[in-house]
Image: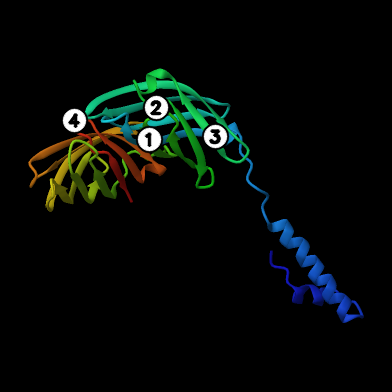
Amino acid sequence: MYCTAKSLSIQTQAPNGKKTLLLAVAFLFVTVLAAVPSSATCSNATLKGTYGYSHGRVGGEPAVKYVVGQITADGTGNLTGLWTMSDTGAISTGTFTGTYSISKDCTGSLTFSSEAVTDGPTKFNIVLDDGNKGFQMIATKENYDQPGFALPGTCVLGKEEVLALNLATLYPGLESLVGQLTLNGKGTITGIVSYSVALDTGTANVTGTYTEKADCTGTMQIKASALDVTLNFNTVAVNDGDELLLIETDNGRLLPGTAQQ
């Protein structure tokens, strides 16, 4: 809106200046009201498309469960998806179907079929966020501490990019990596990381490879020279490929995280 009291009074040639001012104020009040958006109203149609999601932590003591996957919502309350789960370092993968319900206030719930996660949470409460482009989630199963999130699962294949890496283990011990990865758009990775492993810290050059599919899922392998270790991951690209959700697929280990611009 570019109309102001000054411009309106110039256009309104009333003999009484006071009347002109009142008219201008009244007009501005109406235009301000017109510019204020109405309260957000959501429905099942609001959640439609493909989303990368990640959730996990405690899965019934003393186990630790973590999941990275992909959900497709059809806009009418039905879900399909795929997942990779680490159950205290035991890796499994699968697909699922499910349902969802979104209320007017943009809160809702997801229910995955039993094959979604064996002996794990299959029901979540969610809250839509980021202009309803993604959502926050938490499991509703007792004895499970499983918070998480979902982001728009879109990607651009073959893109060259530099990503900031953040990985933190949940099991079996203390291990984390933070660094920078350069993806050359053709499947090759170079970079450098800072690490903390069993309270020993340092830096290491990394090399590796990656794959990407048209559905925005893929794999990544990185080798850290100073650590003498090779790490393998399943990935889900989100936000036009500017971010990857990662979960380690090496049995006996659990190193989830993200890599983002």
In space, the residues marked 2 and 3 are separated at their CA atoms by 16 Å
Amino acid beneath label 3: Gly
Considering the image in quadrants, where does the N terminus appear?
bottom right
Question: Mark 1 = which residue?
Answer: 146
Alpha-carbon neighbours of circle 2 within 10 Å: few (<14), some, or many (≥20)? Answer: many
Does dot 2 land on a helix, a strand or a loop?
loop
- Residue 110 rendering spot, x and y as whole percentages: 49, 29
Question: Mark 3 = which residue?
Answer: 108
Say which residue appears at 17% left-offset and 29% top-offset.
252
Front disc: 3 or 1: 1
Front disc: 1 or 4: 1
Front disc: 2 or 4: 2
Query: In the rendered structure, which disc, 1 or 4, sits on the residue that comes first in sequence?
Result: 1
Amino acid beneath label 4: Asp
Query: In the rendered structure, which disc, 2 or 1, sits on the residue that comes first in sequence?
Result: 2
Whether 172 is drawn above or below 204: the answer is: above
Does dot 1 land on a helix, a strand or a loop?
loop
Say which residue appears at 81% left-offset and 76% top-offset.
9
Query: In the rendered structure, which disc, 3 or 1, sits on the residue that comes first in sequence?
Result: 3
Whether 106 is drawn above or below 59: the answer is: below
Position of 203 with respect to 259 (left or right) is left
Alpha-carbon neighbours of circle 1 within 10 Å: few (<14), some, or many (≥20)? Answer: many
Alpha-carbon neighbours of circle 4 within 10 Å: few (<14), some, or many (≥20)? Answer: some
In space, the residues marked 2 and 1 are separated at their CA atoms by 8 Å
In space, the residues marked 1 and 4 are separated at their CA atoms by 21 Å
Question: Mark 4 = which residue?
Answer: 250
Report if residue 215 is visible in the image: no
Position of 25 with respect to 134 (left or right) is right
Position of 200 with respect to 86 (left or right) is left
Question: Mark 2 = which residue?
Answer: 121
Amino acid beneath label 1: Gln
Quadrant of the image occupied by residue 71: top left
